[in-house]
Image (cartoon, rainbow, N blue to C red):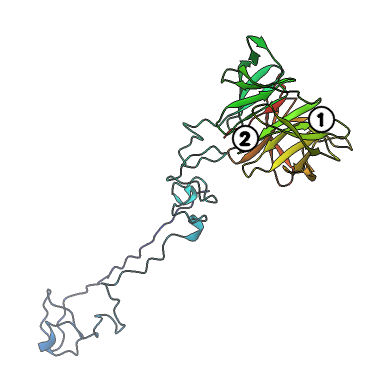
């Protein structure tokens, strides 16, 4: 809704009525003179009557030299207090409830048009890597675009990866049944280290120090491990009573989260994993089953499923919102985007 502010100015008109020419007692009629009361002496004809300092009916005059007080814009027109009027009030603030969105805003990867120019995330790469069975994808959750990059290969042969993530240097890293692999932007890999990967590993995440975490889908009980870039594998601890349903992820504060199958069936669970002991704590139930990929990117947490669903995940409650679904795609893992 747009508000329009109008200002009304009153107009004053003095109406004078003229009758027949008459001659008042003791007063000579002069058409150019000010008409005075018939009781006024002739000597006062050329002077206006004394109506006080205001020149009106005796009321004090307003000081014409003092401007009216400027109370500023209507607070309802700048709810977020960013100094820009809302579009509803004729201004250019496209979201008057978000201080980060105004004509002087700086674009970042988000669901918000920060500079109010009608385009979102212009000139920014807001995608993250994901993979499926032997295929590498680029996913832009804001523009709802999934692009197939190509097959994942090693020495010219197509390979299957358990999971992928980005290391602190921005390099894409994946793990297979017996190798730690570094991948280029087209999915071509080279061996970084030989690894005796434990059975049933399906989650990989890398923290800011370069430590690699691996999580198991099953075991007695399911375990979590740490791995170094030179291939040294250590047990972190068991994940009782949970097991990885498809992925783990490290947030920007280096906290470790994992998707888990729900023991009661139905939708997956989001679980916190202590990165020093593997002790677990339930965060909440997610809104979908088979969430096989997690990506902490651009200040958001995204989940991807084997049915091609891309979800926005609340990392405090586990609740999810489906952003879109990519037909014909299975997601098996994902990497952080920034």
Tell me what residue is drawn at x 72 percent, y 40 percent. 257
Q: Position of residue 266 (x, y in %)?
A: 85, 35
Q: Residue at x 57, y 20 (%)?
A: 184
| Secondary structure state at the residue bearing disc 2 | loop
- Residue behind mark 2: 210
Residue at the image point whose x is 43% and y is 56% from the top: 5
Q: Tag count in the figure?
A: 2
Q: Horizontally, is 217 left or right of 65 in the view?
A: right
Along the polypeptide, which appears first: circle 2 or circle 1? Answer: 2
State which quadrant residue 245 falls in: top right
Q: Is residue 176 above or below residue 21?
A: above
Asked whether 159 or 39 is in front, the reply is 159
Q: Are marks 2 and 1 in contact (CB under 8 Å)?
A: no
Q: Indicate left or right for 237 with 84 as reference.
A: right
Residue lying at 81% horizontally and 34% vertically, measured from the top left: 223
**Helix, strand or loop at mark 1:** loop
Q: Percent position (x, y) of residue 310?
A: 68, 31
Which residue lies under the disc numbered 1? 217
Quadrant containing the C terminus in the rendered view? top right
| Above or below for 333 versus 25 | above
Q: Position of residue 204 (x, y in %)?
A: 70, 30
The answer to whether residue 293 of the structure is visible from this angle is no
Q: Which numbered mark, 2 or 1, is in the foreground of this view?
A: 2
**Quarter-of-image position of residue 217:** top right
Is 44 or 263 nearer to us in this picture? 263
Q: Is residue 196 above or below residue 286?
A: above
């Amino acid at each position: 809704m747009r508000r329009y502010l109008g200002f009304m100015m009153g107009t004053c008109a003095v109406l004078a009525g003229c009758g027949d020419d008459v001659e008042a007692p003791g007063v000579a009629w002069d058409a150019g003179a000010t008409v005075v009361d018939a009781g006024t002496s002739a000597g006062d004809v050329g002077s206006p009557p004394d109506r006080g300092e205001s020149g009106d009916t005796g009321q004090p005059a307003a000081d014409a030299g003092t401007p009216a007080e400027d109370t500023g814009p209507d607070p309802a027109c700048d709810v977020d207090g960013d100094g820009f009027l809302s579009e509803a009030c004729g201004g250019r603030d496209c979201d008057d409830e978000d201080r980060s969105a105004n004509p002087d805003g700086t674009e970042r990867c988000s669901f918000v048009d920060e500079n109010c120019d009608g385009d979102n995330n212009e000139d920014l790469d807001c995608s993250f890597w994901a993979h499926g069975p032997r295929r590498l994808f680029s996913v832009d959750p804001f523009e709802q675009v999934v692009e197939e990059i190509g097959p994942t290969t090693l020495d010219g042969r197509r390979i299957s990866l358990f999971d992928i993530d980005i290391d602190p240097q921005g390099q894409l890293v994946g793990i297979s049944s017996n190798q730690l692999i570094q991948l280029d932007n087209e999915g071509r890999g080279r061996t970084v280290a030989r690894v005796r990967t434990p059975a049933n590993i399906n989650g990989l995440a890398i923290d800011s120090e370069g430590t690699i975490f691996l999580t198991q889908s099953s075991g007695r009980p399911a375990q979590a491990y740490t791995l170094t870039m030179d291939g040294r594998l250590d047990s972190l601890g068991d994940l009782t009573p949970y097991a990885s349903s498809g992925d783990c992820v490290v947030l920007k504060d280096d906290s470790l989260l994992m998707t888990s199958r729900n023991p009661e069936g139905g939708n997956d669970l989001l679980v916190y994993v202590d990165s020093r002991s593997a002790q677990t704590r339930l965060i909440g139930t997610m809104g979908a089953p088979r969430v096989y990929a997690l990506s902490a990117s651009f200040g958001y947490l995204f989940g991807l499923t084997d049915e091609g669903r891309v979800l926005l995940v609340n990392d405090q409650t586990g609740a999810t919102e489906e952003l879109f679904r990519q037909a014909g795609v299975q997601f098996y893992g994902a990497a952080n985007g920034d």
